[in-house]
Amino acid sequence: MKIKTTLCLIIAAFTVGAAGLGTQAQAKSAAVKIGKIMVSREYLHTNTFYRAKKAVTIKVTANHTDGTYATKTVKIPKNTVVSGRKVNLNSKDQTLWINLRDELSYHVLKTAFTQRPSYVPSVQNLAVSPQAFKKVKRPVSLPTWSYGDFYLGGKAAIFKNTTTQKIQFTSDGYLEIHKYVAATGTTTPKPTQSAKIKRVQVNGSIRYYYFNKKIKGLTLKPVTQHGQKQYRLTVKNLHQPQHKAGFSDDDIPGT
């Protein structure tokens, strides 16, 4: 299935949070209105971002159903941008949790997935030293109020989990397409397609992404025959936030 050049998809965080709320006044308030529901500002998906001041090595543990485990090394290159949250370990020490919502690319994390297929590494909330990272502005490649993840199918994808693909804009500047398993709410770690974003232009609610190659499954507009900006993808924010109610009896929060 190909996607139209203008992606009129609702930004989501597994299902959908508050995507595309468009004013600074809404962003600064303690609560925002989504349809008829007042929700916390936390629904706006506003992460803090950090740039690696040097190459950082992380040990990732992969568990097996038989109780055994294996350890792999993931190297985060210098200047890689990550989403993160600082956590106090005690009165003196802090750690930085990164890749909170799978915003890092497979290009960086792939060594964590080279286990036997039955090993499942956890690559979210990786703990690193805060001293190795510097706080930076939100990457312009990430659409407003989102974790960069898109799902095919509009509202049906939100409320019925009918989507089959996830399109991920990563914090370190890649576009990835993943197979999505709606029944389990998971995606395959390795993307079916991956491309480095060469440039981003913002014009109001529209973002233009430029690539130096075609991306199978997306319809990109050819703009030049040479160089790093040969193809352009247009993404339009519809500013139609959606709210999905949770189930308080089962401690499942709304989104």
Image (spheres, rainbow, N blue to C red):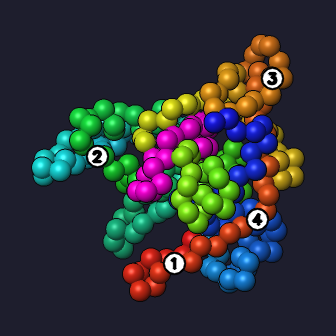
Label 4 element class? loop
Callout 1 amino acid: Gly
Magenta stretch bounds: 167-187
Percent of width and height locating residue 17: 62, 67
Q: Which residue is mark 1?
A: 246
Q: Quadrant of the C terminus?
A: bottom right
Callout 3 amino acid: Pro
Dot 3 and dot 1 residues touching (CB under 8 Å):
no
Identify the mark at residue 120; answer none if there is no mark.
2
Left or right: residue 15 versus residue 66 is right
Q: Which residue is mark 3?
A: 222
Res. 150 in view = no
Q: Quadrant of residue 72?
A: top left
How far apart marks 2 and 3 lie (CA) works out to 39 Å
Callout 2 amino acid: Val
Q: Which residue is mark 4?
A: 240
Q: Residue at x 44, y 76 (%)?
A: 252
- Label 2 crowding class (10 Å Cα cut-off): few <14, some 14-19, many 20+? some
- Label 4 crowding class (10 Å Cα cut-off): few <14, some 14-19, many 20+? some
